[in-house]
Amino acid sequence: MLRAAVAAESAGIPSVSILCEGFDGQGSATGRGHGYDGMALAMTVGHVDAQSADVMIRNFIDHTVDAVVAGLVGGGGGDNIGNSGAKAARAETHPPAEPTALEAVATGTIDEIDRLFVERGWSDGSPVIPPTRERIESFLAVTGHDPWKRLGVAPSSGRDVTVWSIAVNAVMAGCRPEHLPVLLAAAEILVDPGYGSEHSGNTTGADALMIVSGPSAAGLGFNSGPGAMREGAQANTSVGRWLRLYQRNVLGFTFDQHDKATFGNSTRVVLAEDHATLVDIGWEPVSAPFDFGPDDDTLTMARFNSGLVIGSVFGSTPDQVIPYLANALTRVTGWDLTHVYGLGHDQYQPLLVLSPVLARTFARAGWSKADVQQALFRHARIPARVFEAMIGEWSNLTAGRRRLVDLVAEGELPEVFAESSDPDRPVPIVGRPERFMIAVAGDPNRTNAYALANDGPHGWWTTKPIDLSFSTDLICRIP
């Protein structure tokens, strides 16, 4: 809604954005990020999903209408926040000017600096390494990158995404200089409109998972073996921490601005694929759907709401293993089904992480990843009535309460969702087999797996290459 208001204001049309209670900070920050400070906001009372229609209408009339009118006429007051068409207006409400890139913002002991960073919201709460100018310059010195090169603009804050700001947060997180190419790839994903980083603080609290693939991952220190998704390996841990710090300090995802997670997830460490196993069994990496091959170093990112460990998968053949994996994928899936129909058509794309021994079980039987996806599509199904409840009865995010057979008839879903009208018929949890993403990592001697439910377009699957070559940004070229 704020982006529609920005478009209206840009055309000279006064606007008021109506937001749920508690989202005023995010609304103001979004307007500021798009160059419009002090945009008019009108707040509703309470959560609309927890009110009857009569109560919601009464609250809207008693508390919200006056704010809408005030915003349109520029009078302010009430629950209204800001004035319409406020770009460069109301200078007194602007936040204090941010420090420049080279400005020293603190001096003192490590303890004093750490305390200051916590107080100002620049820290994730754990001790940080003070990003002194010397440390940042040393971090960048061996890479050849231009510190002031701009990769894009953060859509949530309007701040420039620069090599320097990436390095500042890398030093704070404890990253090593050789990790910079991975961080640059992550920053390119954050500014890619297809990824949608502006949604990174939505209320379900989904968090991004970075997946490193390719022959160079092990040499960069990334662990793809036992404990692959646990803190411990510096590369996996520090690069994962960098993402959270960068989202906070550059993209503006703090509790008083864009981070509206109801609960949230802990910082996710980087997941590194087991490249050696993939090569040995002839499987492509998780980045393959994005036109990358097994010899490419890549970073893939998507946001996930929840995950489920699939312990002690039993069976020596694919037919024995598939039902257990499929069952886990259905159990981790819930409200996420609105991304099959609702929030975004065919945009539910869960991740299944297989331990190497499970991947080898499939490969030994001659199964490719595509074969596994097809089998999961046949088995990972739920009753149609449950699917319909997820996208209709238990949600207000899709229009009406239409049945799956109606949606198929209207061309909104493929035929597989209406093979009969039996409410108990099994229907798939994804729109097509390719929507099951499969990675290989973890202890090579354990038959465990991990299923994660993605958040659809709110952090859509995106892959960027990791360029490990020395940068020529600062090399003078003589014609």
Image (spheres, rainbow, N blue to C red):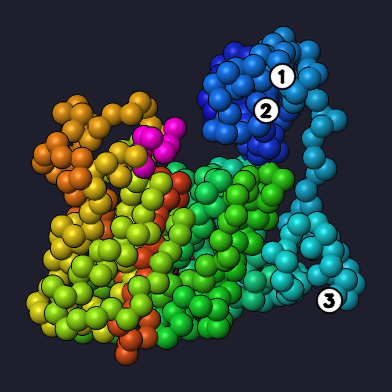
Q: In which quarter of the image is residue 29?
A: top right
Q: What secondary structure is marked by label 3?
A: helix
Lower sequence index among marks 3 and 1: 1
Q: Position of residue 465 (x, y in %)?
A: 38, 64
Residue visible at 19% across and 57% down in the picture:
377
413 left or right of 275?
A: left
Q: Which amino acid does label 1 sit on?
A: His
Question: Front-most of 97 and 302?
Answer: 302
Q: In this view, does 129 lie to the left or right of 264?
A: right
Residue 239: assigned label: none
Residue found at the far right of this picture: 108
Which label is found at residue 110? Answer: 3
State which tag comes first along the sequence, 2 or 3: 2
CB under 8 Å between callouts 2 and 1? yes
Name the secondary structure under disc 2. Answer: loop
CA gap, disc 2 and disc 1: 7 Å
Residue at the (20%, 69%) spot, across then down: 322
Q: What is the crowding at mark 3: few (fewer than 14 residues within 10 Å), some, or many (at least 20)? A: few
From this view, report whether residue 33 is shown above or below residue 224.
above
Q: Mark 2 points at which residue?
A: 45
The kind of residue on which mark 2 rests is Val
- Please provide the residue range marked out in magenta: 390-396
Q: Quadrant of the N terminus?
A: top right
Q: Earlier in the sequence, mark 2 or mark 1?
A: 2
Judge depth for marks 3 and 1 and give the one in front.
Answer: 1
Residue under circle 1? 63
